[in-house]
Image (spheres, grey):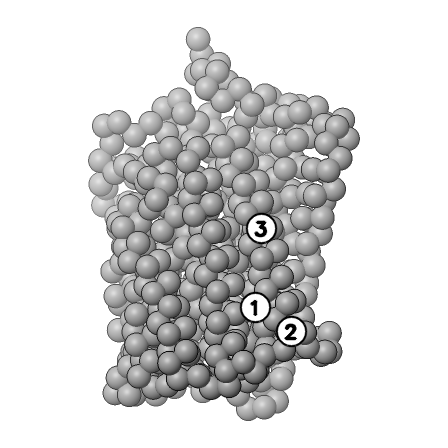
Amino acid sequence: MSKQDMQKKLHPKSAAALDTPDNPQAAIFQQEEELDQGLSGDVFGIEDGHDIKYKTLEWPLVAGLMITEIVSTGLLTLPSSLATVGLIPGISVIAFLGAFTTYTAWSLIQFKLRHPAVHNMGDAALILFGPIGREILGSGTVIFAVLSAGSQILAGQSALSLISGDGLCMVTFSGIFTIVMAIASFRRTLDGLGYLSIAGGISIVVAGIVGLAGAGAVPVQPGNIRVTVKTDFTTAFISIMNPVFAFTGHSIFFLLISEMKRPRDAMKAAWTLQITATSLYIVFALVSYWYIGSNVSSPSFLNLSPSWLKSAFAIAIPNFLIGGGLYTHVASKLVFTRLFRHTKHIHSHTYKGWGVWTFLILLTNTAAFILAVSIPFFSYLVGIASAAFVAWYTYGLGGAFWLHDAYYFQGGFQAWLRQPMMLVLNVLTVLAGAFFSVGGIYATIVSWIRASAAGELPIPFQC
């Protein structure tokens, strides 16, 4: 039996799709699948006997990584969204997005299981859109990861500055945070960060609870809430984009699943993430809004008394740190795997492999630091990148994954027509991705213009 026949036996659906003559993009990708080590067809192949083993993650560690990545600073923006649009619309949007992103996570995981050689969004785009799509979505993943790491650096900088009472220059705090973040991201495999992510995930949950306790202990305007709020479309839309972005994070799911012992357990991790995130978001937004009132700030921790403010931010630091390290690790891993896929440098301790990996870790962390402290409009740059890329990664592409696989695995257009509800759902999912992308770019630019006109943009290299 040939190696190709063995792969078909192990992955009959994927092989059938790749053999389809009407799917030239899949045919291109088949060439890479056939080169994977071993017979499993996944990106890292069979790892017995290798020095560096990637497929070590159990699903609870993957859940920890997902929670640390997604449930972070976005949590603190949600109470202000409720104040802008009202209690009922705000909570409804959060609940809907929690359910919606659970579906898109399921669609992504099913796509990964059918295409085990997919390691990142760029690889998935090769199947869907061809080589140009691979370059665009792969580059987008790296760009967003570096910018997100910069956001975590700024969050860590703010936390350290508040805790110390501005004891050091803010750029110095950013530098210290970046060094520790780089150390956390240095290990070649994700299992080290996986264990740290448990602390990161717990820290943001506990920080949220401490924030709620602080709001209850020293309330600002308790009960000053509105069920609905009449506002203009632009203001409401800008506010609603906070929960939209708070649920984004699917950009790294392929990389996480690629390092799992049992990729079929990935949905367990996704369920854990979605239940944790949606529940925490609703409770935190609701309780914070109730105790702080309609003038709640973003981030909401700024409304806490000084002692509670310092406590909440101090507890959240591990989340900012591990989240940032995860982003720079992912950016480095995507480039490293692209350079050395199917070579000895992936699984062996070689000078070239470790030299390139060290360079990538230093480059991504340094880039995140420089961008974060030098660009006055950095937070708006992150918002534009989120809308341009991550709105598609988290929302729109979930529909494209189902449409592609249903077409190539189940009989073309007839497969779509046999499942009209799924067809409508996934077409709407693609349209939602487009809506969130275009709307997110618009909302971010408008916010940027307003902040600039009000003189609210920070000073570069602020000390």
Amino acid beneath label 3 = Ala
Q: Foreground mark, 3 or 2?
A: 2
- The residues bearing labels 3 and 2 have C-alpha atoms spaced at a distance of 22 Å
Quadrant of the image containing the N terminus? top left
| Image quarter of residue 447 | bottom right
Q: Secondary structure at mark 2?
A: loop
Q: Is 150 on the left or on the right of 408, as rendered?
A: left
Q: Identify the disc placed on residue 50.
A: none
* Residue 352 located left or right of residue 419: left
On the image, numbered disc 2 is attached to which residue?
Answer: 227
Q: Secondary structure at mark 3?
A: helix
Q: Earlier in the sequence, mark 3 or mark 2?
A: 3
The picture quadrant where one finds residue 166 is: bottom left
Of the residues under marks 1 and 3, which one precedes in the sequence?
A: 3
Q: Residues within 10 Å of mark 2 (few under 14, many from 20)?
A: few
Does dot 1 land on a helix, a strand or a loop?
helix
Q: Tell me the residue that label 1 is attached to.
A: 242
Reading the image, the residue beneath label 3 is 99
Locate residue 360, reporting x and y percent. Answer: 34, 56
> Which amino acid is tagged 1?
Asn
